[in-house]
Image (cartoon, helix red, strand yellow):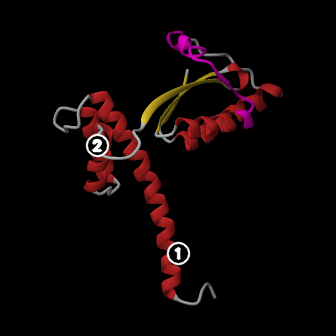
Amino acid sequence: MSGHSKWSTIKHQKAIEDNKRSGVFTKIAKQLHVAVKKGGSGDLNTNSFLRSIVDEARAVNMPMENIKRAIDKALGLGGGAMAEEVIYEAYGPLGVGILITVVTDNRNRISGEIKNVLEKHGAKLGGPGSVSYMKSIVPLPTVTLGGEDHDKLEQLLKLLAELDDVVDVWSNLS
């Protein structure tokens, strides 16, 4: 017997679904903020970045009220903390340079989370300019998969997957 009542079961299932939806809505709200900043306005007709993100938001049934609130917050009209875009530079296993772009309303919280994930996977946070200067250099590293290298490559892939969960928006490998 799974529970005492059908209502209780439905309540728990709805709570799980609502948690998933709120996570998706939060990611899209951050993308809306970046689109407003990139496009320079909150007008859907003149800002193509914003238009594409609004279409994506409507595809996952995000209410227009939430979309408008996120746009107003990006424009500085709404109350609360302003989200900002921060770029972190790191070196992963095998010396791979990683650029991590984050949209957050609290730099201290996200930097701690990123440091924890990097340290857990044997990666190190770099200083400003330590990885970004390599952006124009595009040679792909040659990796021979054997022994220790294979383990380091596996560790790098796990690190990138976990960073994607923490960062929410983008993580770029260069």
Tell me if residue 129 comes above or below residue 35 in the rendering: above
Q: Name the residue tied to disc 2.
A: 71
Name the residue at 58% across, 11% down. Answer: 139
- Relative depth, front residue between 59 and 122: 122
Q: Which amino acid type is shown beneath numbered disc 2?
A: Ile
Q: Position of residue 86 (x, y in %)?
A: 49, 29
Question: Which residues, given as a range, are shown in magenta?
Answer: 119-137
22 within the magenta span: no
Q: Position of residue 59 (x, y in %)?
A: 31, 52
Q: Position of residue 146 (x, y in %)?
A: 80, 26
Residue lying at the far right of the rendered structure: 147
Name the residue at 32% across, 49% down. Answer: 57
Dot 2 or dot 1: first in sequence order is: 1
Residue 63: quarter of image: bottom left
Position of the C terminus, as image quadrant, is top right
Q: Is residue 62 visible?
A: yes
Q: Disc 2 to disc 1, how far (Cα)?
A: 32 Å
Q: Name the residue tied to disc 1.
A: 12
Tell me the tag on residue 31: none
